[in-house]
Image (spheres, helix red, strand yellow):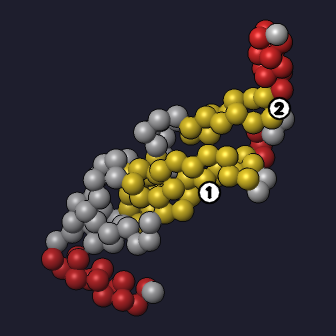
Amino acid sequence: ESQKLLNWGFQNFDAVRVFTRGQTAGSWPVWKGDAPTVQGGFDSDIIVTVPKGQASAVKAEIDRVQPLVAPLAQGQRIGLLKLRLGDQVIVERPVLALNAVGQAGMFGRAWDTIRLWFDK
């Protein structure tokens, strides 16, 4: 019976690798930083198991922290990945900064502060 159950699972489901460890999932603007953007990714592979033939129906959605203000440490959470199959959320994982972003100088921080007042 155990063998039948395993065979059924392998015949009816697919394991899909959506993101690999360290792969860039996106690049987002950083305010008051010494770099204009930060790369976001994951600290482990993101693999989901879906019914056979449904792999193309998996949709990724990233909700990020708004606004991203420096300093940002490598590995700091900057968002949340939601993988959906239809209307159902099947996986939620934090999006992490793949690179550190330090603070800009005094004038860069002042300029971005003014820009943030008008960006809202």
Location of the C terminus (image quadrant): bottom left
Cα separation, mark 2 vs mark 1, equals 22 Å
Residue occupied by mark 1: 61
Q: Which is nearer the eye, 106 or 49?
A: 49
Which residue is farthest left?
A: 106
Crowd rating for badge 1 (residues with CA inside 10 Å; few <14, some 14–19, many 20+): few
Percent position of residue 84, x then y = 70, 51
Note whether 100 is above or below 68 in the view shown: above
State the mark number for residue 14.
none
The quarter of the image holding the N terminus is top right
Q: Secondary structure at mark 1?
A: strand
User: What residue is pinned by disc 2?
Assistant: 52
From the viewer's side, name the closer residue of 104 and 81. 81
Q: Is residue 59 visible?
A: no
Residue in the picture at 73% in, 53% down? 88
Q: Residues within 10 Å of mark 2 (few under 14, many from 20)?
A: few
Q: Residue furthest bottom?
A: 118
Residue 78 placement, left or right of 49: left
Which residue is pictured at 79% across the width and 9% down the height? Answer: 3
Q: Is 101 left or right of 60, judged from the image as shown?
A: left
Amino acid type assigned to the residue bearing label 1 in the image: Glu
Residue 14 lies, in percent from the top left, at 75, 29
- Give percent across and percent down for residue 16: 68, 33
**19 is higher (above) or lower (below) than 88:** above
The answer to whether residue 8 is above or below residue 55 is above
Q: Is residue 107 left or right of residue 23?
A: left
Amino acid, disc 2: Lys
Q: Quadrant of residue 114?
A: bottom left
Tally of numbered tags: 2
Residue 91 visible here: yes
